[in-house]
Structure formats: C-alpha cells, structure tokens
Image (cartoon, grey):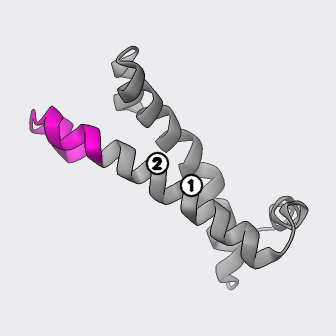
Amino acid sequence: AAGGELTGRPRLAAPAKLGAAGAISLSLAALVHDLGRPTRFLNMLRVFKPTSPMSVGSWILVGYAPLTMAAAATEVAGRYRLLGSTA
C-alpha cells in the first residue's frame, strides 16, 4: 500500500490496505484460537521473549494491527487520507 501511494497508484494502494486489514484480522483470530482463550493473548503481552514465536507474534500484532485498521478505515471512509497514509 505504501509503495502504491508513493508511486501515485491509488488503485493499487486501496486494495492493499484492505487486504492487509483482512489478513491481520485473520492472524489475530488464529493466534487467539491457538492460545485457547482471549485472556491468554493479553497474558502473552506481559513479557517479551525473543525466543518465543508466540510472544513475538503477539507483539507484532499489537503494533501492526491498529495501524493497518486505521489505514483501511480511512480508505473505506474516504476521509482523513493523510492519517491513513501515515498509518
């Protein structure tokens, strides 16, 4: 999406933002399902363990998901596009 926006291709950027939002949502659902209970996801955020793929995945989701959802939401709404591009 960022590459599409930097090169002036909004028809490429829009589906990329929506695809990323869908993919990160499925990733979050898969991780919570793998952990068994949603509270375990929050429990994973207490400590960052670089040797644990589950810990690293949890922290990536926490950092990346809100920005991706903000970018997709601004694209769908058609407003605050600068905020979406920044996200």
Picture quarter with the C terminus: top left
Specify start and end residues of the magenta stretch as a single range.
Answer: 1-15
Checking the image for residue 40, the label placed there is none
Seen in the picture, residue 50 relative to 9 is either above or below; the reply is below
Whether residue 11 appears in magenta in the rendering, the answer is yes
Secondary structure that dominates the magenta span? helix
Q: Residue at x 36, y 28 (%)?
A: 75
Apparent side of residue 64 relative to residue 2 in the rendered image (left or right): right
Apparent side of residue 38 relative to residue 34 in the rendered image (left or right): right
Q: Residue furthest top?
A: 79
Residue matched to label 2:
21
Seen in the picture, residue 73 relative to 61 is either above or below; the reply is above
Question: x, y percentage for residue 12?
Answer: 17, 43
Apparent side of residue 78 relative to residue 28 in the rendered image (left or right): left
- Give the residue type that dot 2 points to: Ala
Question: x, y percentage for residue 56?
Answer: 64, 71
Question: x, y percentage for residue 20?
Answer: 40, 52
Q: Residue at x 56, y 55 (%)?
A: 25
Q: Residue at x 64, y 70 (%)?
A: 30
Pick the residue in front: 52 or 74. Answer: 74
Can residue 42 be seen from the camera position used here? yes
Marks 2 and 1, how far apart at CA: 6 Å
Picture quarter with the N terminus: top left
Based on the displayed image, in which of its 4 quarters is residue 58 positioned? bottom right
- Tag 2–tag 1 contact (CB < 8 Å): yes
